[in-house]
Image (spheres, rainbow, N blue to C red):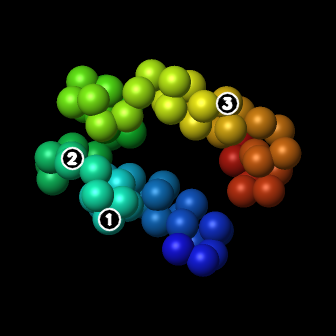
């Protein structure tokens, strides 16, 4: 995806669909972000370090400002 703001909006609206497009194996009825993360960890599709890195990025004030995250 070329537009980060569009990607963020789609991720907020339907995280499972965005992750499915990224080739992650997620049950179709799963749409809670915490459940999705736990599923990805449990099935070894992502590592705890990858989750930690993503959360660190999400909590970065510069990224929050750029994407309008509160």
Q: Mark 2 points at which residue?
A: 26
In the image, taking residue 66 as reference, residue 9 lies left or right, namely: left
| Secondary-structure class at tag 3 | helix
Counting residues from the start of the chain, the first of labels 3 and 1 encountered is 1
Residue for point 21% across, 30% down = 43
Provide the residue designation for mark 3. Answer: 56
Residue 60 lies, with reference to residue 29, above or below; the image says above
Distance between the alpha carbons at the discs numbered 3 and 1: 23 Å
The residue sitting at 74% across, 54% down in the picture is 68
Left or right position of 39 against 46: left
Circle count:
3
Q: Which mark is residue 21?
A: 1
Q: How crowded is mark 1: few (under 14 residues within 10 Å), some or many (20 or more)?
A: few
Is mark 3 in CB contact (under 8 Å) with mark 2? no
Say whether disc 3 or disc 2 marks the residue closer to the N-terminus.
Answer: 2
Q: What element carries label 2?
A: loop
Q: Nearer the viewer, residue 45 or 62?
A: 45
Please tell me whether residue 23 is drawn above or below residue 46 in the rendered image: below
In front: 54, or 11? 54
Q: Residue at x 29, y 58 (%)?
A: 23
Q: Position of residue 46 (x, y in %)?
A: 37, 34
User: Is residue 69 placed above or below 3 in the rendered structure?
Assistant: above
Quarter of the figure that contains the C terminus: top right
């Amino acid at each position: 995806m070329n537009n980060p703001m569009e990607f963020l909006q789609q991720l907020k609206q339907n995280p499972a669909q965005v992750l499915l497009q990224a080739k992650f194996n997620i049950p179709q009825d799963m749409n809670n972000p915490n459940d999705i993360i736990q599923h990805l960890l449990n099935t070894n599709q992502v590592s705890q370090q990858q989750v930690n890195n993503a959360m660190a990025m999400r909590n970065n004030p510069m990224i929050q400002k750029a994407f309008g995250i509160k």
